[in-house]
Every structure is written in C-alpha cells, then in structure tokens.
Image (cartoon, helix red, strand yellow):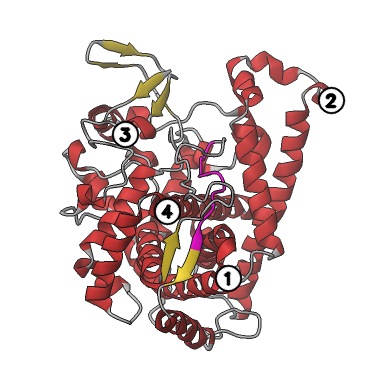
Amino acid sequence: MIVLNSDQTVKDLVDKRGGIYSSRPESYIGQDVLSGGLRILFMPDNEIWKMARKLVHRILGVTAARSYIPYQDLESKAMLFDFLKSPDAFVDHLRRYTASLTTQITFGSRTTSIKDERFKEAFDIFDRSSEMIGSRTAALLDLIPALRWIPDFLMPIKKEGLKIHKRELRLFRGLYLAAKKGLEDGSAKPCVCVDLVKLQKEEGFSDIFASYISGSLLQAGSETTASILIGFVQAMVIFPDVAKTAQMELDRVCGDRLPSLGDMPDLPYIHACMKEGLRWMPGFMLGIPHATAQHDNYLGYYIPKGATVIINVWAIHNDPKRHPSPRQFDPMRYIDDQQTSIEAANNPDPTKRDHYVFGAGRRRCQGMHIADRSLFLAISRLLWAFDFERVVSSETGRDIIPDAEDVTEGIMSIPSPFPVRIVPRSTKRAEAVASAWSQASDLLDERGEWKAVPEDLLWTISES
C-alpha cells in the first residue's frame, strides 16, 4: 500500500501519471457483492469504466451544470424554509436539500420530504453499504480472497450485502425507467437520465448499466455535499467569530435581499468559507483508493503493478506547512483565492490547490462545478438568514462546544450529532425566507414537482 501525504506526490503521480494511477483496488464487498460490479466508484480502469466516464463527462459538462441553476435556487429556498419551520432537524433538512438537488439533476424529480420513501430507501442503502465497505470483514475478504468461499451462513456480510444489492438495483432501475417513460410521454424534465436515454441509442448500453450510472451519481452527489454542510454548521458553532464576519459581508453586499450566485464575486469571504469548509471537514478522509495499472518508479522507489494508492486527504488538509494551525477554521487562508474547484484542481502548482474532496487525476468528481454552486448558495443563504448559537448546558451553565474530532465511522465521515440553536437573525429575515419560498412554490404542482420546464434549463443532449 502506498499512502500519498503531500500535494506534490498527488500531482506527480495521480495527476501527471493518470494512465498508471487511475485504476481501483479490488473491493469484493463494495463492487462485487453490493453492486454486481456496476458501481462507477469502484470500477477498475477498464473499457466499461472508460465508457461510463465518457458518458458522465458529456452529461455533466460546464454548460449542463449552468443549466441546472434553477434547481439549485429552488432547493436552497426550500431548505431555508425548512430551517425556519423546524431548526432542530437541520441535519435532515441538509440531507433533503442535497438529495433533492441530486434527484432533480439525475432523475428530473424532487425529493420533497425526508419521509419520501425513495429518499429513506436510498439513504438506508447508502448508510448500510458504507458501514459494510468500511468494516474489518470487508478488508479481510480483500486481503485473503480464499475467505470468500466460506458459506454465506458463516459469512453474514455476504448474505446481507446481496440483499442490499437487490434493493439498490430495484431502486436505481425504477428511477431510471420512470425518467425514460417521462421522455416518451412528454412529462420529463431536463436531467441526467433523460440524457442517458438519448445516448443509449448511440452507445447501446443496457438499462441496468444506465441505472447504475445515474444511481452512483445520486449517492456521490447527495452524501458528499450534505456531509460538508453538516461540518460547516458545526464549524459556525465552534468558531462564532467566523459567522459574524461572514454575516457582516453579506449585510454589506446583499442587505435584506437573498444572496444569489451572481453575488459570488462580491462575497470573497463567503467563497473562502466554502473552501475552508471543504478543507476542514472533507468527508472522505482517505479518499477512495486508487491502484496502479503497471509498475512504476518514483524518487527511487519501486511501485509494483496492482499496488493500492491512498490519497491521504486528511493529512494534506491538515499539513501545518500547507495550512498553519490546521484545526482552526480560518477562511482568510483563501481570501485571495477565487479559483473554482476545477480551476484549482487543474492548477499546475499543487500548492495552489485548495482541497482534495473531489479526488484527483482521471478519477476526480466530474460534478464538482455543480457542488461548488450548491455549497455557495447554501452557505451564503444560511448565514444571511440565521444565527448558529451554542446551546447552554443545563448542568454546568456553560456553552456546549462540539468536538470536531468526533465523527462517524465508514468510508465517509461526518460529525457525530451535536447541539446547536438555530434562530432567524431578525423578523424581517424570517419573513423574507417565507416569502421567497412562497413565490418559488408557485412554480410547483400539488405534488411539489415543477409545473413546467424551468426557464433557462437546457436540454443538454439533443435528439439524434
């Protein structure tokens, strides 16, 4: 196993030698058992993965990402209204926000409630899968392949994993076929699945393959963004001075109107808060492992074919030479950095890359430009509308300060539950939140879905 602990080694190997470092190590539970070999995240560097990567690149390009802004604007207003109604359930609201964004962009339909059966099913599957993939048993089965032949009744993780795979395939396939039917009857909205249906005629891939491409995007898009936002809320509780500084900038630029994406150039501190949030609580602490496709040599070291390569995101993000006082949430690190995540990832100088949440090389997330906008809208609007206050302990009378190092276990780590008091900054801001959602909801039908294709939303792939 090779662990990359510096930005320079990531640039030299994963970015510059992508042809060697773009495969994946075998993940028996994650790829074979839980997903029937179809999950893009764990696919080795083969022709199937290359086709999937090419398809995702076509349907999540910069133009497509820009066209989805109406979805992001609507869902951020819905999220604010959810916070206003029931602030104690903020984690659920953040997960619904990111899930609904992702279901709209991927399948063309909203997730209107945390109680949505599709939502509950998807996140139960994701949570169980994450636990199983990150388990010691899964690691042992990769280390000693002969153990895979142990009967299922002696290896319950296999039996349970196959059940989860069946549930997941049923969910993904149902969502994809619903989008396919919508295109046929004229009810579809622009989304990834509609683009896949159109490309299916050109490329000839199966419904199941398309279902797993779209389903993989659902999991990656919703979970990663939600974990970053939960970490950001925690940071605002631990570091209240940061929230105050951000709110001063928002008040100066936006006044009593809701921030928009057009304000981003005039809100450098908010943009820096977003970048610092990605650095401070990255979710994937060790990234997703890469593997070498052939032998290599680097700085005198021999790296064999098939070696597992870990990008130690946590170590790079907390390198004191790169980020002094790394556990301090300090947006001023990025106050002069106006790069998008894509621009930073493409920067030839590795010291100028802001974070590694979206991976590196040929395996990096192709939807990072969408994530940037979703995060900026959420962070700017939440800080504009609400204060995030510490809860006072009834036993000691002192403020309860969350422990930033207390995170959940699994392939993705998020803060463990923590107390916070979320209150509107003023009656006027609360009224503005309610008014914004009232106006936005006029565009929706009785099911909470768009009445018509939103203005400025483009059909990315034209009919052939």
Which-is-in-front pick, marks 4 and 2? Answer: 4
| Nearer to us in this view, 130 or 250 | 250
- N-term-proximal mark, 2 vs 3: 2
- Marks 1 and 2, how far apart in space? 40 Å
* Residue kind at label 3, given as amino acid type: Asn
Tell me if residue 464 can be seen. Answer: no
The residue labelled by disc 1 is: 110
The residue labelled by disc 2 is: 153
User: What x and y, as percent, mark residue 142?
Assistant: 59, 21
Query: Callout 1: few (<14), some (14-19), or many (20+) C-alpha neighbours within 10 Å?
Result: many
Image quarter hosting the N terminus: top left
290 lies above or below 77: above
- N-term-proximal mark, 1 vs 4: 1
- N-term-proximal mark, 1 vs 2: 1
Q: Are marks 4 and 2 in contact (CB under 8 Å)?
A: no
Q: In the image, which residues are magenta?
A: 411-421
Which-is-in-front pick, marks 4 and 3? Answer: 4
Say the numbered circle drawn on residue 318.
3
